[in-house]
Image: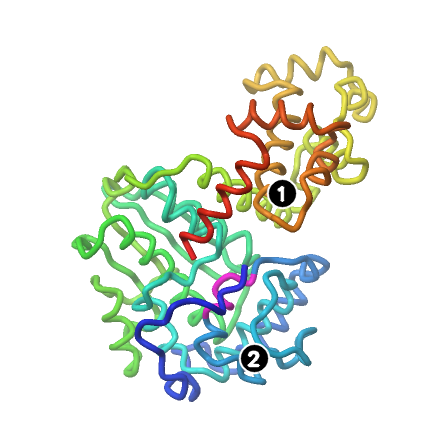
């Protein structure tokens, strides 16, 4: 999704973002060097693609400088980044920003701009999720799936809910800058529900004692503490249940499907159970709905064994297939560049009428009307 047309009510001074504010601690090595190390650690998954998300906002505020893409596969391009880029390019661009821009000025902009610097799925989750708990968990899940070098933990501690960020491996100057930026996304998610009623919320950050961080940290509008073994955001657990008066089940389904697809790719095929992996492969490679007998033969099991196994988990083979098709359907319908006939084929339907019947059963609406109404929602959000 292109963000070049965002409405900047209070323009960011691009010059103020250019001189680099150096990060606390983590001596030795640049953020870009840390990014290259992460690319090596990610192995083949560094080539997989992720939404550009927050980088589209940051690039716009910075004015798309030449150094932004330096050392990436996009080095010769100009203007806004494409909607999807490789994980390798994603983290290299992050490293370039940390080494060349004023991270603290960017963080302050992320906290004060009218529109949160979220991904499309994250923004839809915050604007139209059922409650704060569901929305902020979705934002955290998406952030973890996009950034394989970051460990995101969510847990309830007594009367508090805590989101903690840690690097999966040493990341030098890159991690503190990334973590502070990530905390802004969680803060904006809370503010969307709570407004200025933030008493009881706090963040813990390694920037706590940085002499130049006072303005950026003040923009969090909550108590600031020094970080221990993680960068954290904490708020009362009771806030999780705050309902969203703008909850939209269909838009929420889009956010869930996009995040689930990103998580599935991030986990890799080895982490997906063999039965679901078989279903995914049949749809991916053959555009065909698999049959229970085919799955049993592929796994070397009897159909009766599979039925009993799934029943113990409260599901069935048909339900697994329909869940996968439904998740794919909502993502494909959200992409107007894919013709409806191609959507039907990708989901394993041989004709449009059977596709339409199943689609109405899933979503209570026709594919064409849901695509049209989804476009209107995206326009209203944009």
Q: Is residue 164 magenta?
A: no
Residue at image coords 43%, 76%: 61
Residue 212 or residue 37, whichever sits in front: 212
Residue at image coords 57%, 38%: 330
* Disc 2 crowd, CA 10 A, few/some/many (<14, 14-19, 20+): many
The colour scheme applied to this rendered structure is rainbow
Residue 350 point in image, percent of width and height: 77, 28
User: How far apart in space, not on screen, are marks 1 and 2 (Cα)?
Assistant: 31 Å
Residue 310 point in image, percent of width and height: 62, 18
What residue would you read off at disc 1?
332
Task: Tell me which label, 1 or 2, sits earlier in the chain.
Answer: 2
Residue 138 point in image, percent of width and height: 44, 46
Residue 370 or residue 75, whichever sits in front: 370
Residue 2 or residue 71, whichever sits in front: 2
Whether tag 1 and tag 2 are in contact, CB under 8 A, the answer is: no
Seen in the picture, residue 179 relative to 329 is either above or below; the reply is below
Seen in the picture, residue 81 relative to 64 is either above or below; the reply is above
- The quadrant the N terminus occupies is bottom right
Residue 77 point in image, percent of width and height: 66, 78
What residue would you read off at disc 2?
68
Q: Nearer the viewer, mark 1 or mark 2?
A: 1
Residue 229 visible to the viewer: no
Quadrant in the picture for residue 300 = top right
Residue at image coords 48%, 50%: 121
Q: Is residue 208 left or right of residue 381?
A: left
Helix, strand or loop for the magenta stretch, by majority: helix
- Secondary structure under the numbered disc 1 in the rendered image: helix
- Secondary structure under the numbered disc 2 in the rendered image: helix
Q: Is residue 224 left or right of residue 164?
A: left
* Span of residues in magenta: 52-57
């Amino acid at each position: 999704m292109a963000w070049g047309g965002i409405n900047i009510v209070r323009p960011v001074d691009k010059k103020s973002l250019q001189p680099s504010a150096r990060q606390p601690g983590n001596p030795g090595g640049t953020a870009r060097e840390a990014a290259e190390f992460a690319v090596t650690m990610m192995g083949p998954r560094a080539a997989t693609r992720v939404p550009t998300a927050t980088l589209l906002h940051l690039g716009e505020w910075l004015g798309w400088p030449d150094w932004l893409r330096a050392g990436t596969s996009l080095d010769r391009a100009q203007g806004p980044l494409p909607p999807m880029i490789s994980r390798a390019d994603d983290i290299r661009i992050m490293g370039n920003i940390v080494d060349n821009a004023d991270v603290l000025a960017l963080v302050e902009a992320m906290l004060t701009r009218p529109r949160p610097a979220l991904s499309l799925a994250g923004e839809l989750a915050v604007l139209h999720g059922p409650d704060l708990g569901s929305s902020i968990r979705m934002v955290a899940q998406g952030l973890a799936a996009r950034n394989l070098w970051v460990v995101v933990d969510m847990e309830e501690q007594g009367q508090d809910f805590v989101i903690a960020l840690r690097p999966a491996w040493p990341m030098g100057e890159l991690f503190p800058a990334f973590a502070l930026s990530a905390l802004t996304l969680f803060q904006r998610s809370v503010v969307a529900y709570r407004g200025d009623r933030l008493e009881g919320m706090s963040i813990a950050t390694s920037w706590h004692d940085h002499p130049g961080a006072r303005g950026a940290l003040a923009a969090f509008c909550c108590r600031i503490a020094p970080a221990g073994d993680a960068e954290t955001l904490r708020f009362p657990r009771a806030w999780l249940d705050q309902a969203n008066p703008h909850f939209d089940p269909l838009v929420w389904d889009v956010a869930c499907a996009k995040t689930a697809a990103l998580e599935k790719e991030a986990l890799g095929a080895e982490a997906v159970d063999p039965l679901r992996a078989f279903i995914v492969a049949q749809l991916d490679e053959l555009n065909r709905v698999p049959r229970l007998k085919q799955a049993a033969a592929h796994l070397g099991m009897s159909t009766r064994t599979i039925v009993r196994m799934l029943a113990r988990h409260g599901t069935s083979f048909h339900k697994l297939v329909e869940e996968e098709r439904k998740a794919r359907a909502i993502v494909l319908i959200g992409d107007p560049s894919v013709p409806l006939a191609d959507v039907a084929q990708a989901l394993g339907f041989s004709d449009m009428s059977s596709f339409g019947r199943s689609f109405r059963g899933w979503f209570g609406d026709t594919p064409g009307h849901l695509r049209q109404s989804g476009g209107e929602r995206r326009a209203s959000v944009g």
